[in-house]
Image (cartoon, coloured by chain):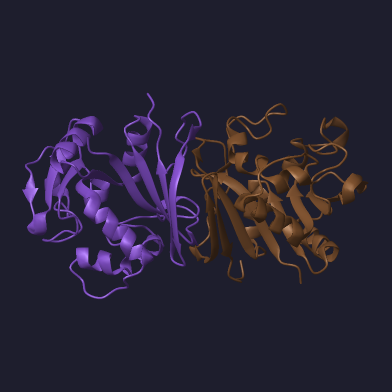
Chain colours: A brown, B purple
Amino acid sequence: MARLICGISISLDGFVAGPNPSLEMPLGEGGDLLHEWAFAAASWRESHGLEGGEANADSEVIEEGLRATGAVVMGRKMFSGGEGPWENDPRADGWWGEDPPFHVPVFVLTHQPRETKIMAGGTSFSFVTDGIEAALEQARAAAGDRDVHLAGGASVVQQYLKAGLLDELQIHVAPVLLGGGTSLFDRLGIDPLGLEATRVIASPSVTHLRFRVPARTP
Amino acid sequence: MARLICGISISLDGFVAGPNPSLEMPLGEGGDLLHEWAFAAASWRESHGLEGGEANADSEVIEEGLRATGAVVMGRKMFSGGEGPWENDPRADGWWGEDPPFHVPVFVLTHQPRETKIMAGGTSFSFVTDGIEAALEQARAAAGDRDVHLAGGASVVQQYLKAGLLDELQIHVAPVLLGGGTSLFDRLGIDPLGLEATRVIASPSVTHLRFRVPARTP
């Protein structure tokens, strides 16, 4: 069965976005600083239809993730920044234009039902209204023998973690203090949970920490 | 001039202590899990007057820190867990017994004046009531050409960081989610601050992330 792997960039103080996110600045103040390592990587640029970039260790980490991923799960807020009915959402087809960088089926958690939207380049957006387990089940079916990538945002990651559904965490720690914003883990309110550290890859731009989450009942 | 270096263990979710710290459980629920890597290290055990332990990469990181440290600064809460007048503090001479593991002068930030207390093994505890800059100045004078180690707790680290007085951060990330407790950085409320990642050392038990903090005016 496809594993559920969360891969996400955070600041050293634990934020996935800076303060005051908006349609103009979806990652909040300073939030772009979390992703500079990715913006500079050849594989990230290629997946976004851009040229250039460095073929470094960070790029290999991204490429490895893209290769391993057969489907993506994300929250509505990460998908469009909006909420409520789709007709009022200025980014109702996501942030990424006609050819999004996923190139696999994406399952968006939302309370607003909607038909699946087929994009260019192999990306499709399906909208799941019956909860995180249903979204994971659909994503697993789509992923085949590859992994399901849990993209965010923070509250969706917390929900999967608390439900005992997350198999692995890959945290990309950017060398920056944001001072505030959206905390990835916040206060989970769970009992202490030991993880198995499986890999560390470091560059001057970012440290990639990978963990296996032990099986448990929530 | 002696550099001020904060070295501290945190959980992956950013806590330096678990929920509900008490005199019986000063690190809070699960807080010991942050330090298992240290408890197992030969150099940590030696500095605490204990035998055994592993002579591994983690032990070398601790040993390097001990060698480089000429004085220590810490907060009252970390020192004794207490507050208010010393005569009411059951741990008024600290947590560590007659021969504390520091072996250099320690400067404790407090609002309660008190004479310097000389312990065995080269440790002394001086009590500084006129603020973080005064404590740092005294620690620098005591450290000579070695570093000043900022030991914690979280609020003291935040104060030095916000005041622009911290030169380096060494964060030991333990592979555990505590789910709550005392957050090291919390929400600093500062503008985004880029750090220079200078070193990563990883073992299965902990990842040591080292950063230089850029000079700036607060």
Percent from the top left, x then y, of residue A214?
58, 70
Name the side, left or right, on which B195 lies relative to A120.
left
Residue B153 position (above or below residue A133): above
Name the side, left or right, on which B113 lies relative to A63.
left
Name the side, left or right, on which A24 lies relative to B149.
right
- Quadrant the N terminus of chain A occupies: bottom right
- Quadrant the C terminus of chain A occupies: bottom right
Which residue appears farthest toward the top when viewing the image? Answer: B217
Percent from the top left, x then y, of residue B17?
38, 54
Q: Quadrant of residue B145?
A: top left
Number of numbered discs visible in the structure rendering: 0
Q: Nearer the viewer, residue A7 or B61?
A: B61
The reply to whether residue B182 is in sight is: no
Name the side, left or right, on which B84 lies relative to A30.
left
Q: Identify the residue at image location x=66%, y=55%.
A: A60
Q: Quadrant of residue A86?
A: top right
Q: Identify the residue at image location x=61%, y=43%.
A: A37
Percent from the top left, x then y, of residue A26?
69, 33
Percent from the top left, x then y, of residue B38?
33, 64
Residue A33 position (above or below residue A66): above
Q: Quadrant of residue B39?
A: bottom left
